[in-house]
Amino acid sequence: MIRFISHLQYADDIIFLGEWSRVNVHSLQYLLKCFELASGLKVNFHKSCLFEIGISIDEINRAANRLGCKVGSFPFTYLGLPIGEKMSRLKNWIPVIDKIKARLSSWKMRTLSSGERIVNQIGSK
């Protein structure tokens, strides 16, 4: 019996979150096999990772071997966002903020007229 498993899904990316137990690992393996049979799609376990919080390294390695996936480590990126410890700290979000600033800056430049671009470039020097 699955104790607790939930998920986050976007397009072809999915994260399963759950209480750690061997039963849950077995159930997840069974669930993914059923998905393959029902959809005709194949789960690429070689690109998949299993992460742990508070589980022994031996236990996580056994589960990863059973599923045929890698053991992941924190922090990692999911859909371009960092996932890991202490995400409430601003320094962990600086790369995301910088990326957004760069995209907004290029978007803003495309909306300016050629004269506004020249003035903007002279002002930044």
Image (spheres, rainbow, N blue to C red):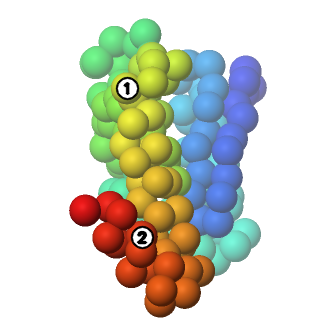
Q: Is residue 4 left or right of residue 118?
A: right
Residue at 59% across / 74% down in the picture? 41
Q: Which residue is drawn at the image coordinates 44% and 79% (left, top)?
A: 117
Q: Can residue 110 be seen in this snapshot?
A: no
Question: Quick check: 70 left or right of 115?
Answer: left
> Pointer 1: residues within 10 angstroms few (<14), some, or many (20+)?
few
Q: In this rendered view, identify the residue nearer to me: 8 or 104.
A: 104
Q: Quadrant of residue 38?
A: bottom right
Give the quarter of the figure containing the C terminus. bottom left
Task: From the top left corner, tell me how far across and down residue 15 is, in percent.
Answer: 58, 44
* Camera-side residue of 42 and 91: 91
Q: CA distance from mark 1 to mark 2?
A: 29 Å
Q: Which residue is mark 2?
A: 120
Q: Position of residue 22 (x, y in %)?
A: 53, 23
Element on which disc 2 rests: helix
In percent of width and height, residue 89 lies at 45, 19
**84, above or below 97, in the image:** above
Residue at the spot 70% in from the left edge and 73% down from the top edge: 39
Any part of residue 46 in sight:
yes
- How many labels were placed on the picture? 2
Q: Quadrant of the N terminus?
A: top right
Q: Amino acid at mark 1?
A: Lys
Query: Residue at horizontal 69%, vertical 41%?
Result: 7
Picture coordinates of residue 113, whole percent (x, y): 55, 87
Mark 2: amino acid: Asn
In the rendered view, would you say 2 is above or below 112?
above
Name above or below for residue 39 compared with residue 87: below
Dot 1 corresponds to which residue?
91
The mark that comes first in sequence, 1 or 2, is 1
